[in-house]
């Protein structure tokens, strides 16, 4: 890591109020609360009302995060938004959020890395602060997965929810927390295992693509599951070893929340004490770019995350993308 030290200065999250329970899904597709809970660990997820978009969730989280950092929107130099469900192709969600929150001095962009979007966005934004280009960056992970989920496909519709999280990333003062290291990967060969086939330049939207239900998430669950377990362990181990640390040094392991079994399996292989692992998928499902901030937020509220704690964030997602960020918590 070069440049000046950077740290997460604040954190805020937002989920829409409406809750979709497993019992609700039992009425929509051929599934059961028992299957969903056993196979995924999910009990309920939050879903937007019609007309609510990703930027709406992002604005809520961003506004709170900036205030919690003791800053105003004008202090933000760059906004990086991780999402696979932008309000529209363009303008970017970052532009929409910049305008709504009144961050008059910020530029920004969207970052597409699916479930790894939050770790990628954190690392990306950190570079701008580390280099001295900006003192404060806003990182938002937000997705309205319900807008691209096929509620006729029981294999995917039970998994996902909507939500947003935001952090302000600032230059760190000595003695504060700091981002210590990161490790990111792409394995593009995994693309077909998890994608939304139509709506882009390869298959522009048409009556046919709609009839064929190609504007929804398609997933080969077993392939993604195996890759996620293997890769989470692998890159987590690599970033720890590079820093002369072991899994036993961690105070908190915060994985992307896609499936309780993935998290338990990966952390068991890695050798992390289960008490150091946070799992909150039961209340939110997989919110894609928002899972890690939502989990961090729950850890803070539960008193499981304190200033100076060593934290490892880890994610695997469509692409395939993978990422870890190793950090000392700053507040
Ligand atoms: O965050 C992005 C990355 N995404 C992930 O990490 C997800 C990774 N994959 C998974 O989490 C799991 O593979 C799933 C939860 C998606 C599926 O769990 P699984 O244990 O791998 O089940 P499966 O796909 O092997 O399906 C087992 C059975 C099948 O029935 P048959 O063929 O054995 O008769 C499915 O049709 O379960 C059936 N099934 C369901 N049954 C009830 C699939 N979905 C459901 C459902 N309710 N919702």
Image (tube, rainbow, N blue to C red):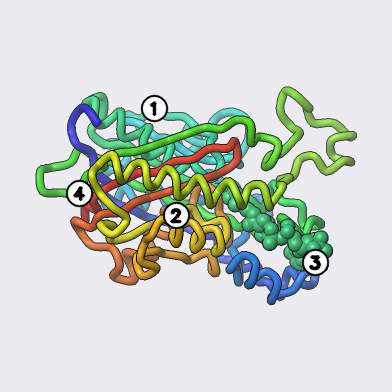
Per the rendering, the mark at residue 165 is none
Pick whichever of labels 2 and 3 is earlier in the sequence. Answer: 3
**Mark 2 surroundings within 10 Å by alpha-carbon count, few (fewer than 14), some (14 through 19), many (20 or more):** many
Judging by the rendered image, the residue that carries numbered circle 3 is 28
Q: CA distance from mark 2 to mark 1?
A: 29 Å
Where residue 277 appears, x then y in whole percent?
39, 64
Residue at image x 23%, y 58%? Answer: 309
Q: Which of these two is toward me, 79 or 242?
A: 242
Q: CA distance from mark 4 to mark 2?
A: 19 Å
Q: CA distance from mark 3 to mark 4?
A: 46 Å
Q: CA distance from mark 3 to mark 1?
A: 42 Å
> Can you tell me whether the CB of the residue at mark 3 lies under 8 Å from the nearest atom of ligand 1?
no
> Can you tell me whether the CB of the residue at mark 1 lies under 8 Å from the nearest atom of ligand 1?
no
Q: CA distance from mark 2 to mark 3?
A: 30 Å
Q: Answer left or right for 302 relative to 288.
A: left
- SS at mark 3? loop
Per the rendering, the mark at residue 107 is 1
Would residue 175 be visible to someone looking at this image?
Answer: yes
Pick whichever of labels 3 and 1 is earlier in the sequence. Answer: 3
């Amino acid at each position: 890591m070069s440049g000046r030290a950077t740290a997460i200065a604040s954190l805020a999250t937002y989920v829409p109020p409406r809750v979709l329970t497993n019992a609700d899904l039992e009425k929509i597709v051929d599934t059961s609360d028992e299957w969903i809970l056993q196979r995924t660990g999910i009990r309920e997820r939050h879903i937007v009302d019609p007309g609510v978009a990703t930027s709406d969730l992002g604005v809520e989280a961003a506004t709170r995060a900036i205030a919690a950092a003791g800053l105003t929107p004008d202090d933000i130099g760059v906004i990086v938004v991780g999402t696979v469900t932008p309000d529209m192709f363009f303008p970017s969600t970052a532009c929409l959020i910049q305008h709504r929150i009144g961050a008059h001095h910020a530029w920004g962009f969207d970052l597409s890395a699916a479930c790894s979007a939050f770790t990628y966005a954190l690392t990306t934004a950190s570079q701008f602060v580390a280099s001295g280009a900006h003192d404060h960056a806003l990182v938002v992970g937000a997705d309205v997965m319900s807008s691209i989920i096929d509620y006729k496909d029981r294999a995917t519709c039970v998994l996902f929810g909507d939500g947003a999280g935001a952090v302000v990333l600032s230059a760190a003062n000595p003695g504060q927390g700091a981002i210590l290291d990161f490790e990111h990967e792409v394995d593009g060969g995994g693309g077909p295992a998890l994608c939304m086939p139509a709506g882009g330049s390869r298959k522009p939207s048409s009556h046919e693509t709609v009839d064929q239900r190609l504007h929804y998430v398609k997933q080969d669950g077993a392939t993604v599951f195996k890759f996620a377990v293997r890769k989470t362990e692998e890159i987590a181990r690599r970033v720890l070893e590079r820093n002369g640390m072991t899994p036993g040094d961690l105070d908190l392991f915060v994985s992307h929340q896609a499936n309780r079994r993935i998290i338990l399996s990966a952390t068991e292989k890695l050798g992390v004490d289960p008490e150091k692992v946070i799992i909150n998928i039961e209340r939110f499902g997989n919110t894609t770019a928002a899972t890690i901030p939502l989990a961090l937020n729950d850890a803070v509220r539960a008193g499981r995350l304190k200033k100076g704690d060593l934290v490892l964030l880890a994610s695997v997602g469509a692409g395939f993308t993978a990422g870890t960020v190793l950090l000392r918590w700053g507040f």
